Amino acid sequence: MTTILDWPGYRVYRHEIDEAGRTLKLWVRRKRGNRVLICSGCGGRAHKIEEVRQREVRDLPWRKYQAIVHVEYYRIRCPKCGLKVEQVAQLPSKAPFSRDFEDAVGLACESAAARQVARQFGLAASTVRAIDLRYLERWTKSRKKPVLRQMGVDEIFLGKTQKFLTVVSNLETGEPLWFGADRKEETLDEFFRTQLSGMQRSRISAACVDMWEPFTKSILKWVADCRIVFDKFHVMQHANKAVDEVRRAEFFRKGGPMRGLVKGKRWLLLSRWVNLDGKKRQLLNDLFRLNRRMMKAYLLKESLDRLWTYSYERAANRYLNQWIDQLRWQRLEPFKKLAVMLLRHLEGILNYCRVKVPFGVVEAVNGNIKSLLRRGRGYKNLRYLLLKAQRMAVLKTEFVVFRKAA
């Protein structure tokens, strides 16, 4: 039974089996050669034993029998901390569960919701979340943190009550680094002040952000030499809004039976041409034959995507100026506003020619976080949500789905 239990440094000296209740009780104590006493306060060695105690914890089941282990442990006299309890590797916390049991629960929570794991192990859902949090804390404490060279900053809308959540991620590893409530300049200032040292901030060479001005101000204030690259997906989102405004204007401008042709084409106009099948392309071609403004708006949106294929800054600037010149006689007011916005953020757009940051990683991280929020039906503890998202990104459990986007 000592071999099956597999607790290093401990042996089973007594056991009881309850066949009716399907339980197995084991009493364990230190082996004779295991004399090293570690203080739970400072982690140093101690030699004086003050008291012998016993503790009951739940361990991994033995087939259909639930295992209950009674552990014998010591209260010791530490030279630094005084009277303390010894550190036992299989007792990670004050909860009545062994480390192997908590690792099994945490491993199950990686692929299932807490309520489902709670039904599997016969525990309360709140207990499973607490075990999972301790499991993730031990994991993040033992692993080596990667160096931050390219960071991504974005926000997620959580709802009317919690509103926005600021997400800072590492673009090279594809994992989130920090969560902050709201999306103000002070929110990102807290990340630079509390999470990074001066040496770590000096290593940041590029930051991928949307065109939200508070984020840009905070980054330039803390990392002056960092190149800010505006996210392509957010720029194309503004282009899609311009196409949608043209569609609504044409819907109200055209009267009678012509409205029926424009109606219901919103998602077709917002889709990329390469992603449409033959039937949907034919529907768009029918619309373009009868409405030239819609065709011009769609072609302008599609051609803007080519801006991020250039590797030279002058070539990209020349292409953008040519794209803006096409708007001169088109009478498309939403695209004129879009052109003004692009010129106002020109440096951040052209910085992509100097630093090729992976745009899709930020959206992939946000997608992983949203999937966690849906599966967990929300998280009150942001630290727990961050650890779950980091574990998901490191193990690539759902991040593989978004690899093509990156």
Image (spheres, helix red, strand yellow):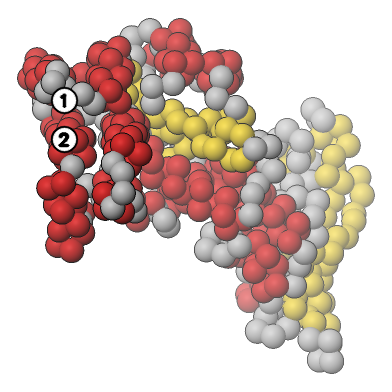
What type is the residue that disc 2 sits on? Answer: Lys
What type is the residue that disc 1 sits on? Answer: Gln
Residue 85 x/y as whole percent: 83, 44
Residue 326 x/y as whole percent: 11, 23
Q: CA distance from mark 2 to mark 1?
A: 8 Å
Q: What is the number of callouts on the image?
A: 2
The N terminus: image quadrant? bottom right
The C terminus: image quadrant? top left
- Which residue is drawn at the image coordinates 12% and 47% (left, top)? 289
- Which residue is drawn at the image coordinates 79% and 86% (left, top)? 22
Q: Residue furthest right?
A: 51
Residue 19 x/y as whole percent: 81, 91
- Which residue is drawn at the image coordinates 57% and 32% (left, top)? 164
Q: Residue furthest front?
A: 256
**Residue 169 in view in this figure:** yes
In primary-sequence order, the first of circles 2 and 1 is 2
Could you say whether the residue bearing mark 1 is in a helix, strand or loop? Answer: loop
Could you say whether the residue bearing mark 2 is in a helix, strand or loop? Answer: helix
Q: Nearer the viewer, residue 306 or 360?
A: 306
Q: Nearer the viewer, residue 312 or 266?
A: 266
Q: Nearer the viewer, residue 189 or 21?
A: 189
In the visual, does 45 lie left or right of 166?
Answer: right
- Which residue is drawn at the image coordinates 56% and 33% (left, top)? 165
In the visual, does 176 lie left or right of 300?
Answer: right
In the visual, does 162 lie left or right of 364?
Answer: right
Query: Pointer 1: what residue?
Result: 330
Q: Nearer the viewer, residue 171 or 280?
A: 280
Snapshot quadrant of residue 208: top left
Residue 201 x/y as whole percent: 43, 16
- Crowding at dot 2, Cα within 10 Å, few <14 / some 14-19 / many 20+, comes out as some
- Asked whether the beta carbons under mark 2 and mark 1 sit within 8 Å of each other, the answer is yes
Query: Pointer 2: what residue?
Result: 296
